[in-house]
Amino acid sequence: MKIIMIILFFLNHSHASGKNLYKSVFPDFDRIEEVKVGDPISDDPVNTVILKVFKGQLLLGYVRKISTTTGCNSACLPVNYTSFYNSKGFFKKILSESGLTKLNHAMFTKADYSNLEFLIVMAPKQFSRLTHPKEMTDAITGATKKEFKEAVVEGAAYSTYRIHLYNQHTLKEIAKLKK
């Protein structure tokens, strides 16, 4: 597991491949500044950087690349994505170069990404009661429990929850940077 997370860390922090992705959200940026942050979510903390994106001296927004697991410790694929925030620290969007996946490794659709972004902004209250993603699913069938169905992307309950956790953490870290 540690080796996988180390590999993901190096893939996650390759700025060269990410610059085109950043340009799609912040087309005028000309400078990036790294800020070290904690990662209390992953067992092996590797998501320890938030990027401040500038055009000259003007702060355009923030970027956080995330490489993690769903937290389920099974055969789930890694969750690799980049989240974008405006200069005030409000969530803008999520992009994933490798694509996010759902149950049975099905790729997210455009509708899934839209739903995910909506859920991120809404920050479902149901998540505040959770201590582990498996609490969202039935232990026997693996189906998402009724009280969480509206709070997750269908077929991607664990990923939705993990992305929610990182978004909430990122919002707190950005708020600290703005002080």
Image (cartoon, rainbow, N blue to C red):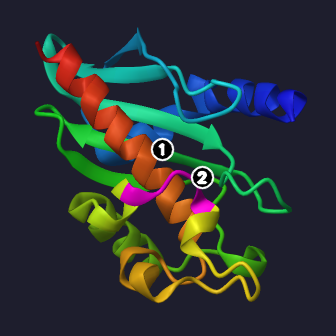
The quadrant the N terminus occupies is: top right
Q: What's the amino acid at mark 1?
A: Thr
> Which percent across, then down, holds residue 104?
78, 79
Residue highlighted by disc 2: 97
Q: Residues in magenta? A: 129-133
Write the residue at 57% across / 83% down: 144
Answer with the quarter of the image where residue 103 lies: bottom right
> Which percent across, then down, holds residue 149?
44, 84
Name the residue nearer the viewer: 125 or 90.
125
Residue highlighted by disc 1: 82
State left or right for residue 57 relative to residue 82.
Answer: left
- Sequence-wise, the earlier of marks 1 and 2 is 1
Answer with the quarter of the image where residue 28 lies: top left
> Which percent across, then down, holds residue 128?
35, 55
* SS assignment for the magenta stretch, majority: loop
- Kindly tell me whether residue 40 is visible in this rendering: yes
Answer with the quarter of the image where residue 101 lies: bottom right
Write the residue at 64% across / 86% down: 143
Report helix, strand or loop for mark 1: strand
How many residues crowd mark 2 within 10 Å: few (<14), some (14–19), many (20+)?
A: few
